[in-house]
Each structure stands twice: as C-alpha cells, then as structure tokens.
Image (cartoon, rainbow, N blue to C red):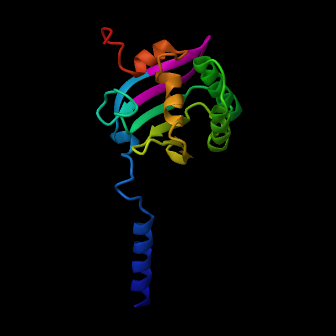
Amino acid sequence: MRISSLIAAGVLSVLLALPSQANEAPPHSALKTVGEGQFSYLFWDLYQARLATSDGKFHSYQQNKPLLLELTYQRDISKADFVEATLDQWQAQQGSLQQRHRDWAAQLDKLWRDVKKGDRLACLLRADGLVEFSFNGQPLGVVEDPAFAAEFLDIWLGEKTTAPKLRVALLGQNNNGS
C-alpha cells in the first residue's frame, strides 16, 4: 500500500508540473522556417539567424504568434556586449533611447548569458504577446511587457533595421524578390 501511494503521488506531481496545453507554445522544432541568414560585422561572422512561424510565413507580429527568432552564435560574445548592442540598435532605429529601453536592457541583463561559439539564443513571441527567451533549449525567462516584442524583433525584422540583407533573408524574400 505504501509503495503504491508513493507511485501515485509521484505521478500526480509530474502531471501537476506539466504546462497546460492552452498556454503551451509549440516546441521550436514544430515551427516552420520562414527564412535564414548570416550576420557578419566587418570580417567577423557573428551568428546565423533563423525566423520560424507555425505556417512558415511571416505577415505581422499580430498574425504570427508564435514566432521564433533563433540566433546560433559563431563567436564568443559577452552578455554585456549583447545588451549594449541591443541598446545601440534601438537608438539607431528610433533616434534616441527612452526609459523603457533602459528598463528592458536591465531585464535582458538578468536573463541573458555570455555566449560561446555554437550556443543558441532563442526569442519566442508567444500567443499572449510576451517574449520568452531560451538558451541552448533551456528557458531563461519572460519579458512581461507586451510592448517589448515588436521593438525587440524590429532589430532584425523592422524596415529601419541596420541589417537589411539579413531582414530580407529572414523574411524569405530573397527568391526572385518575393
């Protein structure tokens, strides 16, 4: 009787720990690639980027949830450099940094890790409009501000991106200009 109670308690605890199907995003592998591209700075290859959605097409942030942007690093980059580069991109796109950008950068500094060659950092725009980060397949945390998603993803996907060739590749528009 005691062993069966322990087994039942173990099964119950495992079931309670599982995420609910209603809030669960599909696994990254279930998403279909929209496009992929290489990001280089001067003569350094920094990362390979991949954009994926449930149907393999990108229309808008509102229509494509979940949406995954996954970066596979080809060099070691410190977390501090990555956070600083994110701030630089927001400033380049918007002309100036706002307090929200500094607040988001502080959150990213808590979530992100230093990356080594071969590491994967993924940004998942969930159905609820929030962004969830993972590192080498392990969850890092969520930015709880719905306004963050578009401004962060615009670094790669927005019309004012500083990497227009990567944007075209990620959006799958490099075949016959489509």
Question: Can residue 135 be seen here?
Answer: no
128 or 66: nearer the eye? 128
Q: Indicate the quadrant containing the N terminus: top left, top right, bottom left or bottom right.
A: bottom left
Q: Which residues are magenta?
A: 37-51
Q: Quadrant of residue 79?
A: top right
Q: Quadrant of residue 52?
A: top left
Residue 82: % across, % down: 65, 29
**Residue visible at 55% across and 32% down?**
118
Query: Does the magenta-highlighted stretch encompass residue 45?
Result: yes
Residue 163: % across, % down: 52, 15
* Outermost bottom residue: 1
**Residue visible at 69% across and 32% down?**
78
**Residue visible at 44% across and 41% down?**
129
Residue 33: % across, % down: 35, 29
**Residue visible at 52% across and 47% down?**
138
89 or 95: nearer the eye? 95
Q: Is residue 177 above or below residue 83?
A: above
Q: Is residue 166 left or right of residue 46?
A: left
Q: Is residue 20 above or below residue 55?
A: below
Residue 2: % across, % down: 44, 89
